Amino acid sequence: MPLGALRPSPLVEQATQHLRDQINGGQWPVGTKLPAETALAKTLGVGRSTVREALRALAGAGLLQARQGAGVFVIATEPEEDWPTRLRRAEVTDVYEVRMLVEVQAARLAAQRRTKADLTAMRTALEARRAAAAGDDAAFVDADIALHAAVVTGARNPVLSDLFVEFVPALRTGLIELLDILDLRAHAPNHGDEAHEALVRAIERGDADAAGSTLQTELAETLARLHRL
């Protein structure tokens, strides 16, 4: 597929797309060295600065790599996806399995490390979850996630907290769909209240084993429902 001259605007975006098409189409396989900037500029009908910006964009996407004194080489044919994008594309069951690993350990740590302020936040979130039972599924899921977030915060580990935040968008979508499809709240608007009360009580009394096992059981039941969809 010939490159062809480009329209005047927007030049950088067009140059980037044309070069990406060449890479995706197999014109330059992985490991290939690209022509020099001057040659690319002449073929595309743009200036070297435009080509340079396009190459920089493709390098940022993980397709190209500049090697000092050697040139620019193709290192991939598809752009790298960041972590949030990969989570959005992942199966909700896969996300949920990892969520279990993160949250069960977080609950155990929260039972050992929680502060008075953390316990207050958990109790407040539990009551908010109960209040949200009168609302729609989206509001209920948001309140449920807020309670789980309070538990994770109580673990006092910023890495665990950051991981949980990354999972939230995919989890929210999956849980809303689960409630809608299975109509779990038709006869129990505050679905799972007893398990969440038990979780908060275990953390309050500092029982790490009980906190972990309670959350493990609650999340495993939800995961089993997701697998059956």
Image: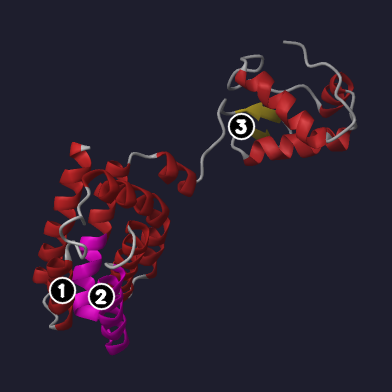
- Between residue 43 and residue 126, name the one nearer to us: 126
Q: Which residue is drawn at 34% across and 71% down?
A: 157
User: Against 18, is 26 above or below?
Assistant: above
Classify residue 215 as left or right of residue 34. Answer: left
Amino acid on which disc 3 is placed: Leu
Q: Mark 3 points at which residue?
A: 63
Q: Residue at x 58, y 22 (%)?
A: 30
Disc 1, disc 2: CB below 8 Å?
Answer: yes
Q: Name the residue under label 1.
A: 197
Give the main secondary structure, helix, strand or loop, of the magenta stretch: helix
Count how many numbered circles sit on residues in the image.
3
Classify residue 40 as left or right of residue 126. Answer: right
Amino acid on which disc 2 is placed: Leu
* Residue 194, image x, y percentages: 12, 69
Q: Mark 2 points at which residue?
A: 126
Between the residue at mark 1 and the residue at mark 2, the CA separation in whole angstroms equals: 7 Å
